[in-house]
């Protein structure tokens, strides 16, 4: 790999990490909204339900299953973004190592 290619790759990876940070924030906000919606639907269903506490809990969980699914999907999306950002950070470190090796090689 040529020195200019290393610099180009570092710039590309840095830009991807920047995008990943924005995506991570958006995913965190989305998850917070999903958790809020889940709590709201579940609590309203619990209040409307009749019967024992166990029955009311079961009914409220049943009524809020769609919101729970959305929350779980948002968590999965957030985790995927975190993993991708970590992978990009690892790629940056590897590219920086290549850069140092090229620099040492050029000195010889």
Image: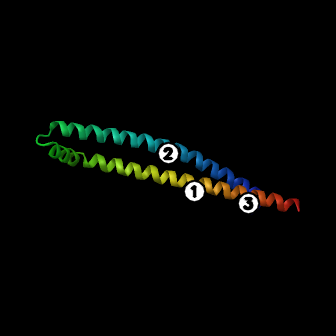
Q: Is residue 107 left or right of residue 96?
A: right
Q: Which residue is mark 2?
A: 24
Quadrant where the N terminus is found in the figure: bottom right
- What is the secondary structure assignment of the residue under circle 3? helix
Label drawn at residue 87: 1
Q: Which residue is mark 3?
A: 98
Write the residue at 81% across / 57% down: 103
Residue 77 in the image, given as x and y percentages of width and height: 43, 51
Q: CA distance from mark 1 to mark 3?
A: 17 Å
- What is the secondary structure assignment of the residue under circle 1? helix
Between disc 2 and disc 1, whose residue precedes?
2
Write the residue at 46% across / 42% down: 26
Residue 23 in the image, given as x and y percentages of width and height: 50, 45
Write the residue at 30% across / 42% down: 38
**Above or below for 48 versus 74:** above
**Above or below for 104 versus 72:** below
């Amino acid at each position: 790999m040529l020195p200019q290619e290393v610099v180009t790759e570092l710039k590309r990876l840095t830009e991807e990490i920047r995008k990943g940070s924005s995506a991570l924030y958006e995913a965190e906000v989305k998850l917070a909204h999903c958790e809020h919606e889940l709590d709201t639907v579940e609590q309203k269903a619990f209040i409307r339900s009749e019967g024992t506490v166990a029955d009311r809990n079961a009914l409220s969980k049943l009524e809020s299953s769609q919101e729970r699914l959305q929350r779980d999907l948002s968590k999965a999306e957030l985790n995927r973004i975190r993993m991708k950002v970590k992978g990009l950070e690892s790629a940056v470190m590897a590219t920086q190592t290549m850069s140092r090796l090229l620099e040492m090689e050029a000195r010889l």
